[in-house]
Amino acid sequence: MSDQADKLRRIVERLTNTEEPKKSEQKKEAARVITVTSGKGGVGKTNITVNLAIVLSKMGYKVAILDVDFGFANVDVMLGISTKYTLLELIRGERTIFEVLTDGPNNIQFLSGGSGVEELIQLDRRQIGKFISSISLLDKLYDVILIDTGAGLSKNVMSFILAADEVLLVTTPEPTAITDAYAMIKMISKKDKHKVVKVVVNKAESYKEANDILDKLFMVSDRFLSFKLQKTGYILEDDCIPKAVKQQKPFCLSYPKSHASHQITELAMNLFQNNDSINKSNVYGKGMRGFFNRLLSNYGLQH
């Protein structure tokens, strides 16, 4: 187990006993949970998730990524870091939350989902309660948890979207990506009219192209679905991005002065600018405990 995991364990032990925690270690009750998703694959969703996590960490937030893109989980590949354990070992009770977390660059951590959800929905009430207690420790450790889902409208993906406090929907100028993004918005609006959905356009050739797409999605969602989106940002085409992917390093670290790095920073600031940082996290949900309770209820399970 890493030194960082040992440190996290000590912080949680201090927070959960009667001893008054140090000011630097005082934590709110719940992390802000943001699901990052897309209507189709190949839009750069995971790349945005990883770089966003690092930028938020640079801004002073404690950040973790939960990679639940089952079958195509590649946060570890993008970071060039091998994972020893997954969510599956935590669900089975074989490893603790500290053991399944993997250290990433710039003080972020990540957790690979593996085939965890399929196993999770097979648990009995007592096992579910034990798992919820374990996963809830993340609320004490982190300010922000980014959940990288699979692409498309499958039951698993939609369950993660509907369970999250808010959704960051990634699309590109490609017509099929825009169509699939709208299909996802339509499904979300049918299930939860109050869901916070924030849209980011990736791989745009210009600011005008990105803004036109945001305007179009905003207009059709408002007019035909009575569902208001939030325009959150864009990432323009940048040669540094594929180079960083080949290097298995986040572009915001490999090319910190690139346009893409400036734009991912703007995106991070847009996510938080209207929310007084994490201090208004109660406006959202109830962190990872609330997230997994809602996720399980989507499968007809509760503990």
Image (cartoon, rainbow, N blue to C red):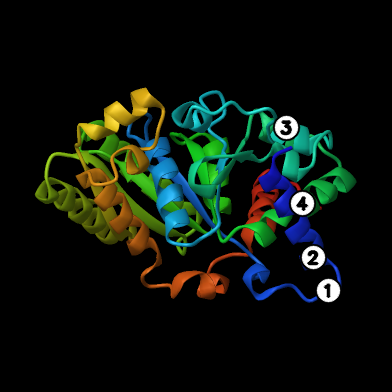
Query: Measuring 68% from the left and 61% from the top, which residue is drawn there?
Result: 140
Kindly identify which residue carries mark 2.
14
Which amino acid is tagged 2? Arg
Kindly identify which residue carries mark 3.
88
Note whether 29 is above or below 70 in the view shown.
below
Asked whether residue 296 is in view, the answer is yes
Tags 3 and 1 in contact by the CB under 8 Å rule?
no
* Residue at the front extreme, as displayed: 3
At which x and y percent is residue 264?
Answer: 31, 50
SS at mark 2? helix
Query: Measuring 86% from the left and 73% from the top, which residue is drawn there?
Result: 18
Tell me the mark number nearer the camera, choosing from 3 and 2: 2
Asked whether residue 221 is in view, the answer is no
Tags 1 and 2 in contact by the CB under 8 Å rule?
yes
Note whether 160 is above or below 112 in the view shown.
below
SS at mark 3? helix
Q: Considering only order in the chain, which callout, 3 or 4, is on the residue closer to the N terminus?
A: 3
Tags 4 and 2 in contact by the CB under 8 Å rule?
no
How far separated are the C-alphas under marks 4 and 3? 13 Å
SS at mark 1? loop
**Other-residue count near label 4 (Cα within 10 Å), few / some / many at <14 / 14–19 / ≥20:** some
Q: Considering only order in the chain, which callout, 1 or 3, is on the residue closer to the N terminus?
A: 1
Query: Measuring 71% from the left and 53% from the top, which residue is drawn there?
Result: 8
Kindly identify which residue carries mark 4.
132
Which amino acid is tagged 1? Glu
Tell me the mark number nearer the camera, choosing from 4 and 1: 1
Kindly identify which residue carries mark 1.
19
Among the 4 quarters of the image, the one containing residue 152: top left
